[in-house]
Image: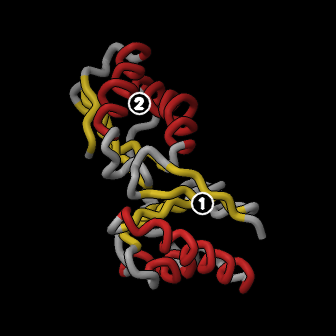
Amino acid sequence: MFIQTERTPNPATLKFLPDQPVLDDGCVTFDTADDAASSPLAQRLFGIDNVASIHLSVGFLSVTAKDPSMWDELKSEVMSALMEHYTAGEAVVTGERYGDVKPIEDETNEVVRQIRTLLDEKVRPVVAQDGGAIEYRGFEDGVVYLKMLGACAGCPSATATLKNGIENLLKHYVPEVQEVVEA
């Protein structure tokens, strides 16, 4: 098995790219070991000191360190844990995926469909390149509610991404959007 790594804009987070899919679809973030009960892989990674959170996606996973200055040690421990996990042939996620719940909203609403399409086609691929994800949480009274996940959660540039990038994009294409906020 071959695993590449990439730095992300968040100095606390490193992106790992195994040569096989991590998830079949979607993404899920675990902020604590208790949250990771449905993921043998995340449980294994939380067994490593200094792991703060784990984000799993189709083609990558991101690990956030409690202390980013320790990445030299932590990187090799995470790589070893990933190799052990994949070599053992264990499932990445079993049962229900905690935190992977999509909001229920009226999909017949044209504004919501436009927002979701723009997020899917223009925003998610770019955010994923940086080891993160974005979760749509709703649209009400001109405000789009989003949650930053993976490397994007807690990233110093996340606010700029939301306000200067995503908000401007959505306002340009969807006049009903007045603001984007993190939920």
Q: Earlier in the sequence, mark 2 or mark 1?
A: 1
Residue 103 visible from this viewpoint: no
Give the percent coordinates (x, y) of residue 151.
Answer: 43, 52
101 in relation to 9, above or below: below
Residue sitting nearer the eye, 14 or 125: 14
For residue 97, the mark is none
Q: What is the three-letter code of the residue carrying label 1?
A: Phe
Determine the image quadrant of residue 122.
Answer: top right
Q: Does residue 182 appear to the left or right of 89 in the view shown?
A: left
Dot label at residue 16: 1
Within-10-Å neighbours for mark 1: few <14, some 14–19, many 20+: many
| Residue lying at 74% horizontally and 62% vertically, measured from the top left | 20
The location of residue 16, given as percent across then percent down, is 60, 60
Question: Which dot, 2 or 1, sits closer to the camera?
Answer: 1
Q: Position of residue 166 (x, y in %)?
A: 39, 28
Q: Is residue 130 above or below residue 142?
A: below
For label 2, the residue is: 112
Q: Amino acid at mark 2?
A: Val
